[in-house]
Image: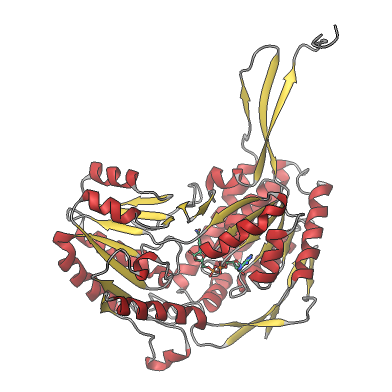
């Protein structure tokens, strides 16, 4: 059985507790690895090492081209091992191979994107009164604590690690305790390319211990967190001790709005893709489908027909279109929301159960599920379910579509489908969300900022915005005619 260790100061380490956690294949409930169960003392050790490494300048003082070369080398090695890593990601998280192959390719592209950014201009100058010259330079924030969830284990890690390292920070990284397998591969690569010891460290373990220590520690200058909104709220509080910089990428309950004049077939495809990719365990999932009244019944009829045909199965089967949920506990949470929906009086028109046939009961498979006849106050409409459960809302006109779409505590993503371009743009501009799509759902790029309004987070990942989150801004004022001021006691 593979033992996953922590990576601290360039060495692979057992946890001080000596304990290892079972890592489970969600397709069949079998143990696939044992992961180090780090605790607060391990987190403190890694933080101290990262602090020392940052203060020594061993990383931030490198030439930009040298830091870039390390990132390019990581990208190359990830690419070389893409087949193995996507296989392991599917084993650990459950999603189909074609999804994890896409994630690994995206992770490679992300390292290359930020490798390129290191050597690009990153400051500005200002015209201020003579004889002064003012300019701004960007510097690394310092020690960055990076905490990620289980739904895109490798990709979420890379979205943070690549810009943090590019900007010259040192890192303490914590993978999700549910899915630490591919993090091990990434750190093997980090070791292999020779990033100096101490610059990037990995501590595995629970959020309440390791994660909380990272959020609280006075030696950590910034926390970048992706996960649930409740955890994000906790991290904000824990970060107050040293007024840590925080970036939070949190949950969502995103509306996907289909107008009657939309391309019907495309809208059906993207509605399915919006909710069932990643088995709905995607922060930006189009989990609320808003349908214009006049097409509601016809759309639902076709959508249900298609959803019932989705091939649910183990992620390693070529035929599989949707994999299992990530864990037994999470599956139980999703099933409990389906019960809540029924009790609240919504009408279940598709799925609704765990799949038990063909030995699938040993895994955590849930049918593609659809609820109609909902009201805006229902919990299934308001709360993030994070599973293959689509909740449908009906609207009469543009004004009601916008009102329903914005009637949520979240503001992560939104989609609008209409062949009237002006209407689609008008509606998207009124939606309070950070990631939006017109006539598609889900495509996203390393170049563009990722993050949410309202309780979906603070700050942005990816693109130049994501890089800036890992920098401090310093103004430098230079006097070009040095002479006494004579201001005091002339
Ligand atoms: P989670 O909040 O339970 O855990 C995320 C990470 O935080 C894990 O590593 C966990 O160990 C750690 N953690 C838990 N409690 C902590 C604490 N008290 N202090 C510090 N760290 C702690 O989330 P999850 O269940 O792993 O992931 C699902 C959630 O992530 C969903 O809500 C989803 O919407 C969100 N998510 C958001 C984005 C985004 O970009 N906005 C992307 C992916 C997932």
Q: Position of residue 32 (x, y in %)?
A: 60, 84
Which corner quadrant holds the C terminus?
top right
Residue farthest to the left? 294
Q: Quadrant of ligand 1?
A: bottom right
**Pick the front one: 59 or 361:** 361
**Pick the front one: 318 or 241:** 241
Quadrant position of residue 253: bottom left
Q: Position of residue 123 (x, y in %)?
A: 63, 32
Quadrant position of residue 235: bottom right
Which corner quadrant holds the N terminus?
bottom right
Quadrant position of residue 51: bottom right
Q: Position of residue 192 (x, y in %)?
A: 73, 63
Q: Is residue 357 visible?
A: yes
Residue drawn at (40%, 81%) of the image = 335
Residue farthest to the right? 489
Q: Is residue 75 visible?
A: no
Task: Using the image, determine if residue 171 lies above or below residue 35.
Answer: above
Task: Using the image, determine if residue 450 lies above or below residue 358.
Answer: above
Residue drawn at (36%, 78%) of the image = 340
**Pick the front one: 261 or 377:** 377
Colouring mode (rainbow / by chain / secondary structure / one colour): secondary structure
265 relative to 380 in the view: left or right: left
Q: Position of residue 226 (x, y in %)?
A: 56, 60
Residue drawn at (28%, 64%) of the image = 269
Counting labels gives 0
């Amino acid at each position: 059985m593979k033992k996953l260790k922590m990576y601290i100061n360039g060495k692979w380490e057992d946890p001080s507790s000596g304990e290892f956690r079972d890592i489970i294949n969600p397709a069949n409930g079998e143990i696939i690895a044992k992961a180090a169960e780090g605790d607060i003392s391990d987190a403190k050790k890694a933080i101290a090492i990262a602090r020392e490494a940052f203060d020594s300048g061993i990383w931030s003082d490198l030439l930009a081209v040298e830091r870039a070369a390390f990132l390019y080398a990581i990208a190359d090695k990830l690419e070389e091992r893409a087949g193995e890593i996507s296989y392991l990601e599917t084993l650990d998280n459950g999603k189909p191979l074609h999804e994890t192959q896409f994630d690994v390719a995206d992770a490679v592209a992300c390292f290359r994107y930020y490798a390129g950014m290191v050597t690009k201009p990153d400051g500005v100058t200002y015209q201020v009164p003579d004889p002064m010259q003012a300019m701004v330079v960007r510097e690394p924030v310092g020690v960055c604590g990076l905490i990620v969830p289980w739904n895109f284990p490798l990709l979420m890690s890379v979205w943070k690690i690549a810009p943090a390292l590019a900007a010259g920070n040192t890192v303490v990284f914590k993978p999700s305790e549910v899915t630490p397998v591919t993090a091990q591969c990434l750190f093997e690569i980090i070791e292999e390319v020779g990033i100096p010891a101490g610059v990037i460290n990995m501590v595995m373990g629970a959020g309440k211990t390791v994660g909380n220590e990272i959020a609280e520690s006075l030696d950590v200058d910034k926390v970048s967190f992706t996960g649930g909104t409740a955890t994000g709220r906790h991290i904000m509080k824990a970060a107050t001790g040293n007024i840590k910089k925080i970036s939070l990428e949190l949950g969502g309950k995103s509306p996907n709005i289909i107008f009657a004049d939309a391309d019907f077939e495309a809208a059906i495809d993207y509605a399915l893709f919006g909710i069932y990719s990643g088995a709905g365990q995607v922060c930006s999932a189009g989990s609320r489908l808003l349908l214009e009244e006049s097409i509601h019944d016809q759309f639902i009829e076709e959508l249900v027909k298609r959803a019932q045909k989705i091939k649910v199965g183990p992620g390693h089967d070529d035929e599989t279109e949707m994999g299992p949920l990530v864990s037994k506990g999470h599956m139980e949470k999703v099933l409990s929301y389906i019960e809540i929906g029924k009790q609240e009086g919504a009408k279940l028109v598709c799925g609704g159960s765990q799949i038990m046939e063909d030995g699938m009961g040993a895994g955590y498979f849930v049918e593609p599920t659809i609820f109609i006849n909902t009201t805006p106050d229902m919990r299934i409409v308001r709360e993030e379910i994070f599973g293959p459960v689509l909740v449908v809302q009906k609207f009469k006109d543009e004004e009601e579509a916008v009102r329903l779409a914005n009637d949520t505590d979240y503001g992560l993503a939104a989609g609008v489908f209409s062949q009237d371009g002006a209407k689609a743009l008008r509606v998207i501009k009124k939606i309070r969300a950070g990631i939006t799509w017109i006539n598609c759902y889900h495509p996203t790029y390393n170049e563009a900022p990722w993050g949410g309004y309202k309780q979906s987070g603070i700050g942005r990942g990816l693109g130049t915005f994501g890089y800036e989150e890992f920098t401090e801004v310093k103004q430098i004022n230079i006097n070009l005619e040095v002479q006494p001021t004579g201001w005091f006691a002339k």
